[in-house]
């Protein structure tokens, strides 16, 4: 069952990622429609469990049923649809990472979940900005970041070999003051 509720929006809830969520995360990250746009290798459950233990703030993106409580709800009260992470916050600018299962792409859940995590990052960490990256071919992810006010800050040319080709990584940043102006 997913963990405690950390933040809620109008439609999505961010919950802590628990050991019971590892099979969902591992299966989702093995899905080609998620793995290739992120440039990730296939991960075992053990490796996903190890990642859960790092210093990142990891949140399960959920659609909560009417009966889902703030603590650890029963599995049938919550539908897991993705994950959002805040990494590197303890020693540099926090970096965001996110993914959703393909069945909910294009429904606005990603924008809401990433917005909740931006708020979380700026309330939790004394950082002047947050960053994120997306491959140049990942139009949906780049569009999501740009719709939230992120600006392109750079490009790492031929950054990684993904799906049979060397791909560019586009770097984005969002200043705290720009986010605060948008949310007032």
Image (cartoon, helix red, strand yellow):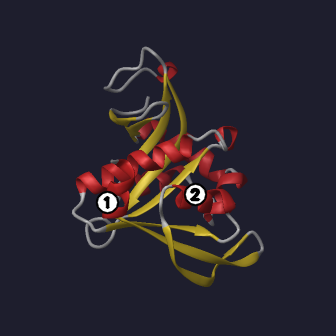
Disc 1 target residue: 55
**Mark 1 vs mark 2, CA separation in Å:** 19 Å
Would you call the spot at circle 1 few (<14 residues within 10 Å), some (14-19), or many (20 or more)? few
Q: Position of residue 35 (x, y in %)?
A: 65, 58
Image: 102 above or below 36: above
- Which element type, helix, strand or loop, lies under badge 2? loop
Instruction: Kindly identify the residue that appears in the image at 45 percent across and 31 percent down.
Output: 10
Q: Which of 166 and 53 is in front in this view?
A: 166
Disc 2 target residue: 43
- Tag 2 or tag 1, which sits nearer the N-term? 2
Q: Where is residue 158 in the image (x, y as percent from the top left)?
A: 65, 84
Q: Residue 104 carries which label?
A: none
Q: Nearer the viewer, residue 184 or 176?
A: 184
Looking at the image, residue 55 sits to the left or right of residue 84; the answer is left
Q: Which of 161 and 92 is in front in this view?
A: 92
Looking at the image, residue 52 sits to the left or right of residue 46; the answer is left
Looking at the image, residue 4 sits to the left or right of residue 13; the answer is left
- Which element type, helix, strand or loop, lies under badge 1? loop
Q: Report the mark closest to the observer, 1 or 2.
A: 1
Instruction: Kindly identify the residue that appears in the image at 55 percent across and 46 percent down.
Output: 110
Q: Position of residue 70 (x, y in %)?
A: 32, 25
Instruction: Kindly identify the residue that appears in the image at 57 percent across and 74 percent down.
Output: 170
In the rendered view of the protein, which quadrant contains the N terminus? top left
Q: Can residue 50 be seen in this view?
A: no
Furthest toward the right, the residue is 164
Q: Nearer the viewer, residue 151 or 96?
A: 151
Are the residues at dot 1 and dot 2 in contact (C-beta closer than 8 Å)? no
């Amino acid at each position: 069952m997913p963990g405690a509720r950390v933040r809620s929006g109008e439609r999505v809830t961010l919950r802590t990622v628990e050991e019971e969520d590892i099979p969902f995360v591992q299966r989702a990250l093995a899905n080609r429609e998620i793995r290739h746009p992120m440039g990730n290798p296939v991960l075992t459950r053990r490796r996903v469990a190890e990642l859960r233990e790092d210093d990142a703030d990891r949140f399960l993106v959920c659609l909560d049923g009417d009966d889902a409580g703030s603590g650890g709800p029963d599995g049938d009260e919550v539908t897991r649809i993705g994950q959002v992470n805040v990494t590197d916050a303890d020693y540099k600018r926090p970096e965001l990472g996110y993914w959703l299962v393909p069945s909910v792409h294009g429904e606005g859940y990603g924008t809401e979940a990433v917005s909740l995590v931006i708020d979380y990052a700026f309330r939790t960490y004394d950082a002047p900005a947050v960053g994120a990256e997306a491959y140049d071919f990942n139009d949906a992810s780049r569009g999501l970041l740009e719709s939230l006010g992120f600006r392109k800050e750079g490009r790492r040319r031929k950054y990684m070999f993904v799906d049979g080709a060397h791909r560019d990584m586009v770097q984005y940043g969002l200043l705290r003051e720009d986010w605060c102006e948008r949310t007032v």
